[in-house]
């Protein structure tokens, strides 16, 4: 027997976990954006500077947004798209294998997709502001 509050708790746990992960990954990139841009450009990836800057900002500010439950489904979809792009980048450009390569990216994409489908839950700014 499922209780309605479990969905809300699942959304909260998922948002807090994924938000914290992206915030932790985004902060060093935002803190030294030129280093991040330089590394991605150095790989020769097309549009490297733009992708590095956008993904860094998304990870930092999107992580905060998920933790707060603000624009949850939009941010989650953006994370799904980012993780698919980084998976392609890891596999094609960096030639990484699945294990110790891009399996975490796919795991993060799956959790982000769950949040996009599940929604923010009752314990969110989205719900408080009437956005969900």
Image: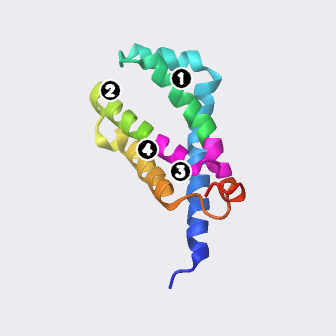
Closer to the chain start, of discs 3 and 4, is: 3
Q: Secondary structure at mark 4?
A: helix
At x 58%, y 76%, the residue is 4
Closest to the camera, between mark 2 and mark 3, is 3
Q: Position of residue 105 (x, y in %)?
A: 41, 42
Horizontal and vertical percent position of residue 107: 41, 50
Quarter holding the C terminus is bottom right
Q: Residue at label 1?
A: 53
* Element marked by disc 2: loop
Residue 29 pos. (x, y %): 58, 26
Near mark 2 (Cα within 10 A), the count class, few <14, some 14-19 or many ≥20, is: few
Task: Say what secondary structure mark 1 lies in.
Answer: helix
Query: Which label's residue is closer to the chain start, 2 or 3?
Result: 3
Main SS class of the magenta portion in the image: helix
For residue 80, which numbered disc appears in the image?
4
Please identify the quarter of the rendering in which residue 85 is found. top left
Task: Tell me, yes or no, whether the two marked residues, 1 and 3, touch with CB atoms within 8 Å.
Answer: no
């Amino acid at each position: 027997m499922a209780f309605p509050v479990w969905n809300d708790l699942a959304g909260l746990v998922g948002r807090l976990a994924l938000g914290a992960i992206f915030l932790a990954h985004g902060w060093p990139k935002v803190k030294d954006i030129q280093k991040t841009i330089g590394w991605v450009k150095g790989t020769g990836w097309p549009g490297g500077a733009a992708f590095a800057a956008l993904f860094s900002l998304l990870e930092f500010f999107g992580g905060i947004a998920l933790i707060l439950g603000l624009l949850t489904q939009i941010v989650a979809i953006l994370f799904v798209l980012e993780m698919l792009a980084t998976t392609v980048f890891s596999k094609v450009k960096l030639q990484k294998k699945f294990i110790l390569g891009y399996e975490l990216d796919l795991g993060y994409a799956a959790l982000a997709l769950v949040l996009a489908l599940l929604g923010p839950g009752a314990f969110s700014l989205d719900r408080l502001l009437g956005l969900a």
